[in-house]
Image: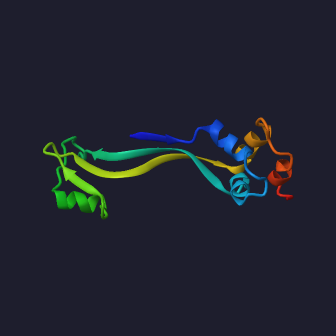
Amino acid sequence: MSHHTIETGAFIDYLVSMTPTASCLRSTLDKDHLTLVAALNANSFTYTFEHSAGAMVKFTRPEAKVLCQAQAGVDVQVASCGKIVVTSPTYVRYVAWDGKPIAKEVVTGPGFLDPLPRLVSGKI
């Protein structure tokens, strides 16, 4: 599993350096838009299935592919021990901010632009 994140300070510095009328800045500060600031990426998942008595349920590879609804680019293997290993790099969790906390950081950050408060309140 890997973690991908935007360095908050660098992100805010970048936003502060933008022209107040830049469409990217307006979208980022809009409270109805979300900006992904962190995400977890997993390359593979391992599944073990057991019935109610605790014994492992083993599947064939075709059964496992159907069970996991594998699409093109997804590799499904059944280990000799019965575990199903699905390799498909995917984002499993993320952190998103709406424009309100981002705008707060930009407005209170060093060197913020004078027209920015009007932009944040939607009166530009």
Q: Residue at (76%, 36%) from the top-left corner?
A: 109
Q: Nearer the viewer, residue 110 or 54?
A: 110
Q: Residue at (17%, 57%) from the top-left corner?
A: 61
Query: 122 left or right of 26?
Result: right
Answer with the quarter of the image where residue 52 lies: top left
**Quadrant of the frame with the N terminus:** top left
Q: Nearer the viewer, residue 5 or 76?
A: 5
Q: Residue at (21%, 42%) from the top-left corner?
A: 53
Q: Residue at (19%, 49%) from the top-left corner?
A: 57
Q: Residue furthest left?
A: 80
User: In the displayed structure, would residue 7 be above or below residue 98?
Assistant: above
Q: Nearer the viewer, residue 9 or 78?
A: 9
Q: Position of residue 91 (x, y in %)?
A: 44, 50
Looking at the image, what colour scheme do you see?
rainbow
Query: 99 left or right of 123?
Result: left
Answer with the quarter of the image where residue 2 lies: top left
Answer with the quarter of the image where residue 8 lies: top right
**Quadrant of the frame with the C terminus:** bottom right
